[in-house]
Image (cartoon, grey):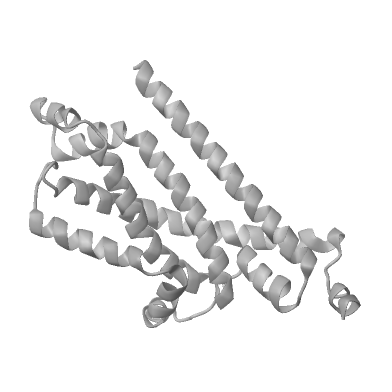
């Protein structure tokens, strides 16, 4: 039995032929998702903060409603969410498998997560940041972009780093619906075909990727904070 299982392992010299395309598919999914997550989730976070009592346009009812929706979006584990919105995914994409079917639930999961992180980043700002913008006569857009988001940029970059890592993890889970990427490789080859070499390779690549992303994110955050302190 042992020899039978080992005989199915992909030779190490051939691993890259499977790994490189899968790695590219993973980054394709993550790249598409992050475009929507940063744009929409960032806007959600800004609105959440500015409709609160500390914001530019306090709207308690809107804030409670939006906060409830964000909490609801963050409540479901990704695998459950992915299954729950299959009809919506099919309506949008016309399929329930592959990259298009994976991107939709990843976006739905990523937006509330990033939105809450952006809101928290803005909450950490001193109240004077918004007050100075108001006193100087800036418009709402100017205060949000040049004061709030500018001052919170290091924390937002840290949030983006965390979100990218989460989306890589979600893309691996999406491999269960044939989405492609490293997760699909691990499920189909590593798990279903008992290919130990593929499983080891996917684990190593995922760990190395996450470590690299975190390292780059930390360095960017440190550089931005140093720049703010200098000026």
* Placement of the N terminus among the 4 image quadrants: bottom right
- Badge count: 0
Depth check: give the residue in front, 60 or 97: 60
Residue 76's spot in the image, x, y percent?
A: 37, 69
Rendering quarter of residue 89: bottom left
Rendering quarter of residue 141: top left
Residue 208's spot in the image, x, y percent?
A: 65, 48
Vertical arrangement, residue 56 with respect to residue 138, above or below: below
Residue 124's spot in the image, x, y percent?
A: 27, 37
* Residue under the point 83% across and 68% down: 10
* Residue under the point 51% across and 52% down: 165
Q: Residue furthest front?
A: 2
Q: Residue furthest top?
A: 230
Residue 28's spot in the image, x, y percent?
A: 55, 59
Depth check: give the residue in front, 133 or 8: 8
* Residue under the point 34% across and 66% down: 75
Vertical arrangement, residue 69 with respect to residue 39, above or below: below
Report the side of 208 relative to 122 (left or right). Answer: right
Report the side of 63 relative to 44 (left or right). Answer: left
Report the side of 231 relative to 28 (left or right). Answer: left
Q: Residue furthest right?
A: 3
* Residue under the point 37% across and 41% down: 156
Rendering quarter of residue 112: bottom left
* Placement of the C terminus among the 4 image quadrants: top left
Depth check: give the residue in front, 216 or 36: 216
């Amino acid at each position: 039995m042992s020899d039978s299982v080992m005989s199915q392992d992909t030779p190490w010299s051939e691993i890259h032929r499977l790994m490189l395309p899968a790695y590219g598919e993973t980054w394709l999914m993550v790249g598409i998702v992050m475009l929507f997550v940063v744009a929409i989730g960032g806007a959600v976070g800004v609105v959440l903060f500015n409709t609160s009592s500390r914001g530019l346009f306090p709207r308690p009812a809107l804030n409670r409603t939006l906060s409830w929706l964000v909490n609801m979006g963050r409540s479901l584990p990704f695998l459950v969410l992915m299954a729950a919105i299959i009809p919506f995914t099919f309506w949008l994409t016309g399929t329930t498998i592959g990259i298009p079917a994976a991107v939709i639930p990843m976006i739905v999961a990523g937006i509330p997560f990033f939105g809450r992180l952006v809101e928290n980043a803005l909450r950490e700002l001193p109240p004077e940041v918004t007050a100075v913008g108001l006193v100087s006569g800036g418009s709402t857009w100017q205060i949000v972009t040049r004061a709030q988001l500018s001052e919170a940029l290091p924390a937002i970059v840290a949030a983006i780093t965390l979100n990218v890592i989460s989306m890589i993890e979600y893309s691996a889970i999406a491999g269960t619906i044939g989405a492609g990427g490293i997760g699909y490789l691990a499920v189909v080859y590593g798990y279903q075909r008992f290919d130990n070499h593929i499983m080891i390779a996917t684990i190593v690549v995922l760990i190395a990727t996450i470590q690299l992303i975190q390292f780059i994110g930390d360095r960017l955050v440190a550089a931005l904070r140093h720049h703010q302190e200098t000026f």
